[in-house]
Image: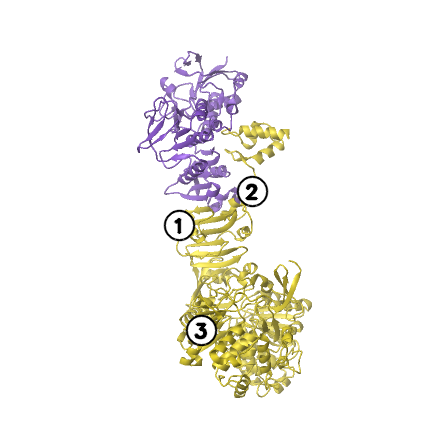
Amino acid sequence: MTKPVKITKTTCPYCGVGCGVQVNQSEDGSISVDGDSLHPANFGRLCSKGSALADTIGLEDRLLHPQINGEQVSWDSALDAVAQGFKQVIDEHGADAVAFYVSGQLLTEDYYVANKLMKGFIGSGNIDTNSRLCMSSAVSGYKRAFGSDSVPCSYEDLDQADLIVIEGSNTAWCHPIIFQRITQAKQQRPELKIVVIDPRKTATCDIADLHLPIKPGTDAVLFNGLLQYLSQQNAIDHDFVQQHTEGFAEALASALASSLDIAQVARSCELVEQDAARFFQLFTDTEKVVTLYSQGINQSSSGTDKSNSIINCHLATGRIGKPAMGPFSITGQPNAMGGREVGALSNQLAAHMELDNSEHHDLVSRFWRTDSLTATAGAKAVELFDEVASGKIKAIWIMATNPVVTLPNADKVRKAIEDCELVVVSETNLNTGTANRADILLPAVAWGEKCGTVTNSERRISHQRNFLPHPGEAEEDWWIISQVAKRMGFAHAFNYQSAADIFREHAALSGFENNGKRDFDISGLAAISDKQYDELEPIQWPVTLDSRKGTQRLFENKHFFTTTAKAQLIAVKPRAPVNITSEEYPLVLNTGRIRDQWHTMTRTACSVRLNAHISEPIVQIHPADAARWQLENGALARLDSQYGNMLARIVETEEQRMGSVFLPMHWSDFFASRGRVNALVNPVVDPISGQPESKHTPVKITPYKPAWYGFIMSRKAVRIDAAQYWVKIKGEQFFRYEIAGETAFNDPAAWAKEQLGDDGEWLEFTDQGMQCYRAAKLQNKQLESIVFIAPTHDLPARSWLSQLFAEQTISNEIRLCLLAGKSGAGLPDTGPMICACFGVGENTIKEAISHGKASTTDELGSLLKAGTNCGSCIPELKALLQAENTA
Amino acid sequence: MKEKLVLIGNGMAGMRTVDELLKLSPEKFDITVFGAEPHGNYNRIMLSSVLAGDKKIDDIIINDLQWYQDNNISLHIGKTVTKVDRVNQQVVTDDGIKANYDRLIMATGSLPVILDIPGKDLDGVISFRDINDVNVMLETAKTHKKAIVIGGGLLGLEAANGLMIQGMDVSVVHRSNTLMSQQLDQNAAELMRSELEQKGMHFLMNHHTKALLGDQRVEKISFKDGSEIDADLVVMAIGIRPNTKLAEISGIQCDRGILVDDTLQTHTPNIYAAGECVEHRKKTFGLVSPLFEQAKVCANHLADMSISSYISSVTSTKLKVTGIDLFSAGDYIGGQSTEALVFNDPAQHIYKKLVLKDNIIVGIVLYGDTRDGNWFFSLLTESKDISSMRENILFGQYQVEDALEIMS
């Protein structure tokens, strides 16, 4: 790469760590990315996904033009159709018959405009976000405890802590840069203790001093036990509790009821008693403790209570609002926090204000100059799609998210979307599972093309900047929403010229009649110029005129945002997951992310290197469970819940807890035939937060026994027929398909030619008795495609074949090995055949002569047998002898 | 005084026997050799190379006349033995030469099968058996254009290829759909046909010759389906049969060939036979390797060592036909109770097939790439269970770990 001619500082579009990214563009147009060494979230580090961002900015599979019913249309037609469609439904059925389902992938400005349109002007609460699936229990937990959705901590607290409790988070894979930060802290200060609480022994446990493989769903029992233990050990900060909190006695009573002593906690949580005791002791003895928690807490039917059981322990010990301590929820998405700030959850208003607060209602109505502002909460994600399914909601606009893949009971969601009267989808990609079921498709700009702000897990607002032009007719989401708003008759309120306009309004609203009453206040940024907005440095809110540099830590003044200004301890009565295992569904399904894929893979699957880590939907299962259910490592399994089923590749691992299985959440219908794990997930939610219990669904597992297994590699993408199981994986200059089918082939060769086209030069191997078929197609000496079919999953490794697609020419030696699937390394080059009878090559003969082992044809004959049968080669032998001897 | 050994037939089998005998017991016999052809001993297999212009006659001579002198062998070339007097242990030639023997080797070889059809004796109708046939073909190619080869076996294709190289327009007439059916299965035969067609050879498959037409010289060939084509030269290469004429005249017991036991002795005392003229345990022979095997056993017994016996086993055929490498052995067709491993790379003109029965190789046909032929054949003769290498065996010895271990 030549020297960069343009450097753009932006942020990573993946997890909630919110790393700064430096994009280098060179004269030849090539693009590379580095970590932004000055960004306080990552100081130059990037994880595997962030490092591969440059691989993902191509235009393959992109949606580039508006479409109505699959036909390309002009923006005007598309926007008119959306506006008219929504207006018509509202006119006929009322405002609650329409909904927006938005995303933590949106920028704050997009989010703000969407929320303003739905709540302020359409007049319904029916806007919810996919962040509902990832951190809404953390939001409810904070709100119950602090009176506001306030993440008290900063990443710096992790650097300084003496104990970090990682609870329900595979930080190593899901927030890798936070994990690296903790790892570095531990290297520098080995006295820093790490406790990981997770049913699985994940990669995060690599740095753990103690791992508690907790029984799924019993986290509140553990933290209630901790509260009880703290009290028993006189570790309560009574001054703080008395002066700054309420509810301690009730919380402790509840804790005692569920978690009498360590022995009982260990029993309930299925932990070794000494381990539980050690955790309690460490927490008790360590002042500087951060509890870092994520989906393992949040994605639960009692997620709010679980987070409060954690916060209780911090409040009871006064470990909040001080350096190196606090209950720290880390978010999954790059802008989950931004969504919370603008209020784009159906039970929020805007700028951390409440729907059911008349003062807030009045304030926002005046600020937005609207008399249509809704006063009632809308439907939360799962409920919202239930209402789509029931027909209560008749028009839905989905932006930057893929509910067909990510919502629980996903098959029902898919059906709901298919049956819905009007489905509008704003997307970057054509094929997501949701986009291709839309009536109206609106092309949105992607990372690198769009520009606005995001907020990471530590309340840090960063500018995500563009460095690429808008491709095709793709547009900013805020522009699309504003255009529809104008066409619905709200032009006066949506006359934005830029993202900066929106940001200033959003900042102004946060400060509007605030006076310290509300935690979210960025009024210090309300008057920034366009240039200042463009140059905005990462900054942690609140940002007021008094705190222009932002705020590292909340609650240092021990002032909370409840009516009494005191923090609330919540009496938590632990509840088991809603659906418990049964004879029919004896295993607990736990879902989550893997290291190198993001969400539904529309971007990360474009990167060859990211596909190499885990290429297929896998089910991780303990070997004892695998034996019990007759599963074979590397073979396929079918998983069923009462909601749906899927297929996955079996990975036996002792890191998995017995009685539970883990499956990744990423695969859509475009990357796997039956890999959508959310088809299985129970649609039960936390009654307060509405967050689904994605970490706990009873399932059963059975061996999936196809008639055949196989794989295809092809330079061009192919549409796979006859395989009930397929997974598509992008490789270097090829696509790989792992396949399996239920019906034995009569004529696999004919099928292969249908799949791959019968042009080119074909090499084929058949072993009909073993039902094996292998073929390779070459074109212009290059490898074009490969297909292997066998009755078992025991097929050659794909690695050697994968490399061959980059070869300009397949040599004859490699050609002979192609269908073995491995190199014939060590194959000596014997040279052109001289003695055909005994297969003696010229090089072998020359070597025998030159090493003095033979000087006559008779000697060659007795040494190599050459020439001793038909004798036809004796003249050549003589010639070789003469040539070598005169040489 | 040395015993007298007479050899009738100065060909590959007979002379290999003499060769082997000289190695074992060079002083035991006074040796006399009668050959009907007017040459020294030559490599008949390489006649096709001579026809193709790759080799000259001199190149294919195994033992020249000097060699016979050097080894004190009385050689009578161009002499046909007409009678074996069993009682007096004497042979007589067409021109009256008589030679007594203590031991006699009959190595009279084989005769080409000639279709018994009208016109078979016309000028320009020949077989492909000896140097004379090759010379006729080379001469004819200089003056005539259209050659017909009847018989799509190994010999016929080599004749056709040679004639094509000599500039003739060649059509091969074959009665079935499978060329070289003694060596190839249908797939390999198809490959062979298309490869030769690409070179310009024509094929009349499933054609049955009815008659050869012409006054003096052959002009046309007509088929049972009524069709006809022009022909300036007809080469009959539809097979060989053991040459038992002399043995029969002389009262040596014959069936299809001269009957021999496991020591290559005929039913007549002191008379041995070897090569394509013999019938051993109901089998007759046409390939070089069993002939050489017979020569070894025969020589062993002539040398009074008597420690060797001939067992005809599955033989492998490794050939280069018209430049194409072929290997075949055993039951290369297969049937109900067998399974086949097949590799096909038509663009590279490579086809390989192993026929398995209960995971043991029972048949091999290799086309275009024969480098693993001998390895496969050794697995066949050892009846080795190949189940552990079944997946990759066809891709070669070096792709099979078990094989590597065995070798190391």
- Whichever of labels 3 and 2 marks the residue nearer the N terminus, that label is 3
As rendered, which of A537 and A291 lies closer to the eye?
A537
Residues behind callouts 3 and 1 on a single chain: yes
> What x and y, as percent, mark residue B316?
45, 34
The residue to which callout 3 is attached is: A81
B201 vs A491, left or right, is: left
Q: Amino acid at mark 3?
A: Ala
Label 2 and label 1: CA atoms lie apart by 33 Å
Q: Nearer the viewer, mark 2 or mark 1?
A: 1
Which chain wears purple?
B
Residue B278 screen position, x and y as percent: 40, 25
Residues at circles 2 and 1 in contact by the CB criterion of under 8 Å: no
Where's residue A233, x and y in %? Answer: 62, 79
Badge 3: chain ID: A
Which label belongs to residue A747? 1
- State left or right for residue A143 relative to residue A163: left
Q: Which chain is yellow?
A: A
The answer, for residue A716, to whether it is visible in the render is yes
> SS of the residue at dot 2?
loop
